[in-house]
Image (cartoon, grey):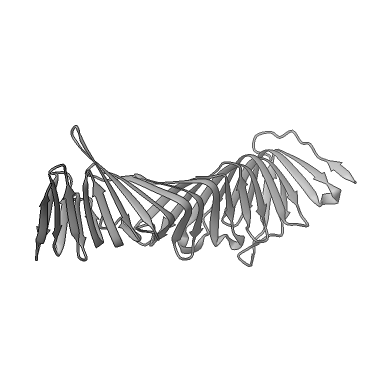
Amino acid sequence: MNKQHVNIALTLTALLFVLLPGQLFGDNVRAVITGDNMEILDRGAVTTFRGTVKMVQGSNVLTSDYMKNEERKRMIHAAGNVVYESTGLANNNSVLIKSQTAEFNTATNYGKFYPGAEMLYSIRSTTITEIINVTAEVIELSSGSAYSECRGNVRMLRSSDTVTGDYMKTDNANNTLTVTGKVVYKTLTPGGTVVDIRSEILTYDGNVSIAKFGPGVELFYTVIRGTQTQNVKVTAEDVLLDNVTAKIVADKNVRAEWQTNVATGQRMVYTSADELMVVTGKPVIEWKDEKVDSRYAAEVVTLNFAQDKVMLDKNVNGTVVFK
């Protein structure tokens, strides 16, 4: 192998650089790499950079302590304090990824970041910008950066929300985000209620304003009032969480359990502003204790756990069995 070695002691801001004929979304955008020290191998087919290394290609910027460029494959291998940033995604979205190792293709913009990668994903609309923090064992950017995939111990933070799962995919063009594999969602309402939602699939739509869970969902509410704590478990086929209206809607075969009580129906709407659960769709509520078993049906059943109160409205009928 013919090896040519270049080692230059730099002063102030002097830099070495190489131009790469990479492609960005089909346009002729060259990639420029700069570094403190450069080594040329295999008659220029391979170049390595050390020190403060930086690659710029259009709206893509990749920095690291070490970078190896394989010209024939259009592949860049980066290691040590890797930081990648792109502001040219669809819908004006942007991404910033940190890891210890990365692989990046300057022709397709495919990127792989590992191990223990962290991503700041900004989703923009005409009115708001949502910033999501994601950590995973591996984060990959698709060719053209149309979407990203996060694998292994995925954890997402958004405002007061925390989501964990095995896999997450972001779709830049449609502004959707999907989490799968033993998904756990946790948040704290303004009223102080802890909400814990579990399912196999979670899909965010519309700038992360609407979250859809299902099929097969479990919700756990922990209502804390002073020294009193009320634990409520709700199961349903599907659940929709609307961050704009601050409502959680559970649909199909809804069942709420607390203490020795059970409420069933086809729909339950929880509003964090008043901490009420409203059950409709042929709702039935049952109370059981040592002396009495009660069963009531109505058109609407409202559960107020903050005040430990149940309200039944319209066409109420029931039975009471004394033991």
* Residue 257 x, y percent position in the rendering: 25, 49
Whether residue 274 is visible here, answered yes or no, is: no
Residue 228: quarter of image: top left
Residue 268 locus on image (x, y percent): 24, 59
Q: 121 or 212: nearer the eye?
A: 212
Is 224 above or below relative to 62?
above
Q: Is residue 189 above or below residue 58?
A: above
Kindly identify the residue that appears in the image at 70 percent across and 47 percent down: 77
How many circles with numbers are drawn on the protein? 0
Q: Residue furthest right?
A: 1
> Which of the 4 image quadrants contains residue 231?
top left
Residue drawn at (23%, 54%) of the image: 270
Q: Nearer the viewer, residue 108 or 3?
A: 108
For residue 120, side relative to residue 211 (left or right)? right
Nearer to the camera, 291 or 232: 291
Q: Quadrant of residue 223?
A: top left
The residue under the point 14% across, 65% down is 299
Q: Position of residue 4 (x, y in %)?
A: 86, 43
Which residue is at the far front?
323
Which residue is rendered at x = 35% and y = 58% of the image? 209
Q: Position of residue 146 (x, y in %)?
A: 55, 62
Q: Residue furthest bottom?
A: 26
